[in-house]
Amino acid sequence: MKILASYSIKGGVGKTATSVNLAHLAATHGYRTLLFDLDPQGASSFYFRVRPSEKCKTKFFFSKEKKLQKNIKASDFPYLDILPAKLSFRNFDIMLNYMKKSTTRLHKTLLTLKKEYDLILIDCPPSISLLSENVFNAADKILIPLIPTTLSERTLQQLTTFFSTHGYRNKKLIPFFSMVQSQKKLHKDAMTRLRKQYPHLLETSIPFSADIEKMGVHREPVTAFAKDTTGAQAFMALWEEVESKLACTKKKRALSI
Amino acid sequence: MERQLLRYHLPKRFSANKLQQLLNTKYQIYQQALPSQTLIFYDTFEWLLWKKGFVCWYFQNQLSLQRRDHFCSPYDLYTLDTLELPSPPEILNIAPSTFAQKVQKIIKARALTPTAEVQFASTLLDCKDSEGKTRLRLQLDTLQSQSQPRHKVKSLIVQPLKGYTTDAHFCQQLLTQNQCEQTSKTLLGEMEAHGLIQPSHYSIKPTFNLTPDLSVHEVISKITSHLLALARLNETGIVNDIDIEFLHDYRVALRKIRSLTTLLKHAFTTEKFNELKTSFGELGKQTNILRDLDVYLNHQADFTQLLPDSLQSGLHILFADFQQARTLEQNKIKKHLKSRNYLKKIKQLETQFQSSASLCHGPLANEPILKVAKERIYRQYHVIRKKSKRITPETPDEYVHDIRIACKKLRYLLEFFADLFPENEITKLVNALKKLQDHLGLFNDLCVQQAFLQDYYHNQLKKAHHPTEEIYQLCLSVGGVIAVLYQKQLQARNKVTNHLSSFIDKDVRQQISHLFSTAEGEKHENTCELQH
Ligand SMILES: Nc1ncnc2c1ncn2[C@@H]1O[C@H](COP(=O)(O)OP(=O)(O)OP(=O)(O)O)[C@@H](O)[C@H]1O
Ligand SMILES: [Mg+2]
C-alpha cells in the first residue's frame, strides 16, 4: 500500500481537484483506492456526493481501527472508497489535539488499512500545522500544486526549508504546476524560473480550465464526466507520471458486478 | 474493500418494475436494462474445467476464464483471462496465447466444446439518495435455456455498498416481505439446480459399486455393461474428431473388458471365452494405427527437442506424412464406427452382457466375487514377483514387456474390485504400482517407437525408386531420433529394475498377503508358474 498526499500551505491551488481526479483515475486503473478527505470543509467528499456518518466522534475516529473502517463509504465508482472527515470545528480541534501527541499517529492509523487498499490519497487542508507533520510522516509522496507565480516560489521555498530543517526527505515532495494560464506572461516566466530551480518538477501541468471548474456543478471528477477534455487529459498525464514515481502495486481480485 | 453479494431467488411474477415500485418510496431508481444475449459455456467432454473448479464462457465476442466460485456474471471484468473471438466455434481451438496456456494446463489434450447455451438478460438498478449518491446496487439476472424455455433462473443480487449498511438492511427486509428468498447458491449453482447447466459424471475410471456377495457372473455383467456404455459414449467424439482422448478412452474401456474376461475366463465356457476374446481383440485392433499416429502427433514438440536445427527439416517431412496418414486413418475409423457391421456387433455384445446368467457357464460363474478377487489379485502379484526376480541386465527386453502386461493386469484387478477392500489400502497399492507402471510404460513406448520408426524408414526407402533429397533428410532425422530414443531406453530400463525390486519387496508383499491371501491363493502361488 502506498500513501499519496495532495498538499500545499496555500489555499485554493487545486489540491482537492487533484485528489479527486487522481483517486478516480487510480481506481479506474484497478488500484483499490481510498480517498481520505482530511479537510474539515469536506470538499472531496462533496465531489463524490458522500455525506459523513452522522455521529462521527473524532475521539474514536483515529483511535480504533474499527471506528475508522466504519466511516469509510463506497463511492459510485468501482475500486474507490471515500473516508469523509467533515467535522464540526470543535471536533476538528479534538483531532488536532490527538495528533499533537505524536506526528506519526496518522501513519500508524492508516497502516491498519494496508490489506484493503493499494493506494490511499489524502486531500489536505491548507496550513502548516501539527496535522501537516502527520501527513509528511504518513505519505510516501506529497503532491504540491503550484500556481506559477512569484508567491508560489516563496511558499515552495518555505516548504523545502521546513523539510530540510525538520529532517524530512525532500525527495518526498512532488511539485507540479496547477491552474496554469499559459497566455499569461507572468505564468510563463515563473514556470521557466521554477523549472530551472526545481528540476524534479513534474512535466505535466494542469491548465486552468472551465471543465475542471464545472466539477462543482456535476459533483463528479472531470475524468468521469468529461474525460476527453483537455483538463481531464491533463490529469491522466499527471496520474501516469505519479504512478511511475509511486511504484504502487495492484492486488487483483474478483470484484462484484 | 471486499464486497459481499447477497443473492435472492425470486418468485415467478417478480419483475424489475415491481422491484422499482417497492424501492421508489425511498430512492430515486436508475434502471438500465442490458438486452438479452447468448451465453455459451465451454468445457471438455468430462467437464475437466468444472471438476477442477473453473468455468469458461463465451459472451459478447469474448471468451473468458474464471474460478467457478468467483463467477457472478458474464459481464464480470475481473476474470482470470479473456480472449476476443468473433464467433463461438463448435470445437474451440485456441491460438497460442496466455489464455490457451492457462486452459491447456488443465485440459491437456482435451478440446473444449459448448456444454450449455442460455439467453442472459440483466437489469441494473441503482438506488440513489436526494444528492444523487448511490446507496445500493441491485442486479436482476434472467437466464433461460434456448432449447428448453421452461428451464429458467431469475436471480437478484443485492450489492450492499460500504458505509451504507442501513440501506442494505432496508432492502433485505423489503425483499423478505415480498416472498423473495435469500440463497447461498452461486449463479452457477442456481443454473445447475434448474437444469440450465448439467455437468457430466463421465469418468473412464468409474466405480462399479460392487458388494462381496455378488457372484462372478453378476460382476462381469455389471462391469462390462458399464464399460461398454462408456466406450460407446466416446463414439461421437471420435467420429467428429473432437480430440484424441475420445479414442483413447474408447480403447481403454474395450481393453479393460478384454482384460476382465481373460482374468475371469473360467466364468465362461472355453468356446465362449475364445469368441469374446476375438470379438474384443478385433474391436481394439481396428484403432491401433490411429492411436499410434495420435500419440506421435501429440508429442511432435518433444521430438523436435531431440534433434539439432540441422535435422529439423527431416522431422517436418516425417510429421507432415503422419498428419496425412492420420487424416486417412481417421476417415477409415469414422466409417468403421458408423458401419452397420460394427453397430450390429457392439449391440450384440451389449445384450449378451446384460444377461450374464446365460452368458457365463464356466465353473467360476457362480462363485462369490470376494473369494475370486482375492485369489486373482494374490496370484497376479506373485506372477509379477516371480518374473521380476529373474531379471538381470542380460534378460531381453521382451521379458520386461511381459512384466508390464502382468502389472497392467494387476492394476485392472485392483481397480475393478476396489469396492471390496478398504479404500486407503487399495489407494496405497495402486500408487506404488502406478509409479512402477509409469517407468514400464515409458520403457515400452521407447522400444515401440524405435521399431515403428525403423519400419517406417524401410518402407520409405522401398517406396522411393530414386532417393530424393527429401528422403535423405528424412532418413537422417529418423536415424537421429532412433539414436536418442535408444539412449533413453537404456536409462529407462535401469529405473524399471529399481522400481521393480521395491515393488516385490517385503512391505508390499506383506500388504498383499494381509489383504488378499486365502488358502487357495497360496496354493496357486506355487502352481502359477506352470500355468503361465
Ligand atoms: N485547473 C483548474 N482550472 C480551473 N479551476 C480550477 C482548477 N483547479 C481547481 N479549480 C477551481 O478552483 C477552486 C479551488 O480549487 P481546489 O478546491 O481544488 O483547491 P484547494 O487547494 O483544494 O483549495 P482549499 O485550499 O480551499 O482546499 C475550485 O472552485 C475549483 O473548482
Ligand atoms: Mg481543498
Image (cartoon, coloured by chain):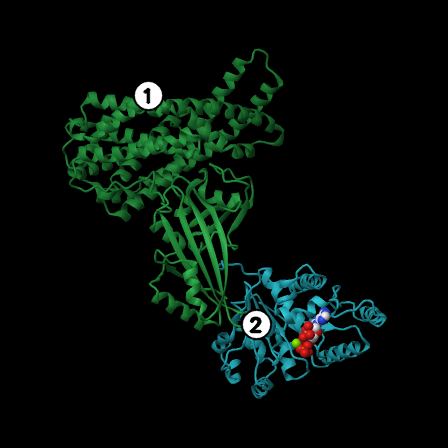
Chain colours: A cyan, B green
Both marks 2 and 1 on one chain: no
Tell me the kind of residue under disc 2: Arg
**Horizontal and vertical percent position of residue B64:** 50, 48
Disc 2/disc 1 C-alpha distance (Å): 74 Å
- Residue B513 sits above or below residue B343 on the image: below
- Residue B339 sits above or below residue A45 on the image: above
Front-lying residue, B415 or A224: A224
Q: Is mark 1 within 8 Å of ligand 1?
A: no
Quadrant hosting residue B492? top left
Q: Nearer the viewer, mark 2 or mark 1?
A: 2
**Horizontal and vertical percent position of residue B96:** 56, 40
Label 1: chain letter? B
**Horizontal and vertical percent position of residue A112:** 52, 73
Tell me the kind of residue under disc 1: Arg
Front-lying residue, A79 or B140: B140
Front-lying residue, B206 or B242: B242
Q: Residues within 10 Å of mark 2 (few under 14, many from 20)?
A: many
* Residue B393 seen from this side: no
Front-lying residue, B498 or A163: A163
Mark 2 residue element: loop
Split into quadrants, the picture shows ligand 2 in the one at: bottom right
Residue position for label 2 = A49
Q: Residues within 10 Å of mark 1 (few under 14, many from 20)?
A: few
Quick check: B486 left or right of B415?
Answer: right
Residue position for label 1 = B340
Quadrant location of the N terminus of chain A in the rendered image = bottom right
Q: Is mark 2 within 8 Å of ligand 1?
A: no
**Horizontal and vertical percent position of residue B484:** 52, 30
Label 2: chain letter? A
Mark 1 residue element: helix
